[in-house]
Image (tube, helix red, strand yellow):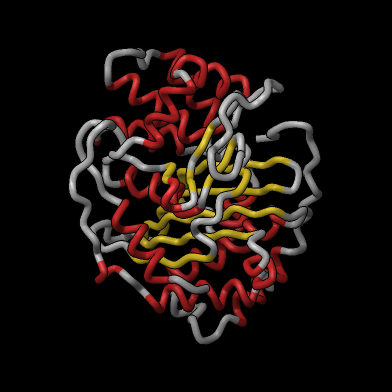
Amino acid sequence: MSHFLMVFTAFFMLMTAAGPAGSAQPQPFLPESCDPRLQQGLENCIAALRLNEAVRTRNLSVVLVDITDPECPRLAYANPNHMMYAASLPKIAILLAAFERIDRGEMELDAPTLEKLKQMIRRSSNDAATEMLNRVGQDFLLEVLQSPRYRLYDPEADGGLWVGKEYSKSSARRRDPLHHLSHGATALQVARFYYLLETGQLVSPEHSRTMKAILGSPEINHKFVKGLKTLHPDSTIYRKSGTWQDFHCDSALIEHEGHRYIAVALSQSPDGGRWLSELIVAMDNLICRPESVTPDDPTRVASMADVRRRSNYPPRTSSGPVE
């Protein structure tokens, strides 16, 4: 996993911003937040789960950020800037654009709108996502993602979050300029979304809190949710996932045992759902119970993975985004 300092610098140069979406202020670099031990722990977990080949072939991207102390985040990653098709995960971008409209007084957060946003995120309703995208406007959404304030899609960082079509059978109107994806993401930019959310920097502190609440109470029990709720049912999860054919993605802000962390994983494999369910348990232990799975001894991770493999994850096939 090369270029650590380059990616780390890009992450923290982008992580904080203030002011309206069309403006930008100087963004501090936080070198003291670099955590080689967490990075080594993640690398050992990936090895123990036998996912090194998936990382090498760029069929798996992972970002883990410990934000128990949000002013001193700790980062670990694999292929953080590799943009992949992300199915329904980029619906979080529609959520952000909707609240930008609401903040400007151009949309009302009434009960029906709130319910549509919850359906889009918690149930991953394609109908609700298409309706909200049309209300927000695709051009406006892409302007928000590429704005100096957010830079959640950044050509200099190999892309990021992108929504170039409705969640329907319609053709893509605006594919991303770098990779020509209709619904794409990089793990790093998704992690930035959650960091900005947790620190109240998406639209406003009040709107960030409302968006976080909408991301809570996920209603689809697979991947990160299945892995965590099986072994750690006390975890609080704010989450958006995505699935289409052999693309399996998940992203979450997780609160557990007094810790808070961001986990993002994008994969392309029929086994991706299982990978993510196992990986989140290993990452949770790295953050919350480092003494039980130390960076020097990943054998416990492998043992947990063997237990998790008893679960059945059939390949998903569909002509469009499943969730």
189, above or below 80, in the image: above
Q: Residue at x 70, y 63 (%)?
A: 308
Camera-side residue of 124 and 36: 36
Q: Residue at x 54, y 62 (%)?
A: 79
* Residue 317: x %, y % from top left: 80, 40
**In this rendering, does residue 258 appear at all?**
no
Q: How many marks?
A: 0
**Is residue 170 shown left or right of residue 235?**
right
In the displayed orientation, state which residue is furthest to the bottom: 296
* Residue 176: x %, y % from top left: 54, 37
Camera-side residue of 208 and 17: 17
**Is residue 180 shown left or right of residue 103?**
right
**In this rendering, does residue 188 appear at all?**
yes
Q: Residue at x 79, y 35 (%)?
A: 318
* Residue 311: x %, y % from top left: 75, 57
Camera-side residue of 250 and 184: 184
**Is residue 167 shown left or right of residue 29?**
right
Give the image quarter of residue 136.
Answer: top left
Q: Residue at x 44, y 42 (%)?
A: 153
Give the image quarter of residue 228.
Answer: bottom right
269, above or below 237, in the image: below
**Is residue 224 shown left or right of residue 236?**
right
* Residue 192: x %, y % from top left: 38, 49
Give the image quarter of residue 67.
Answer: bottom left
Q: Quadrant of the C terminus?
A: top right
193, above or below 284, in the image: above
265, above or below 219, in the image: below
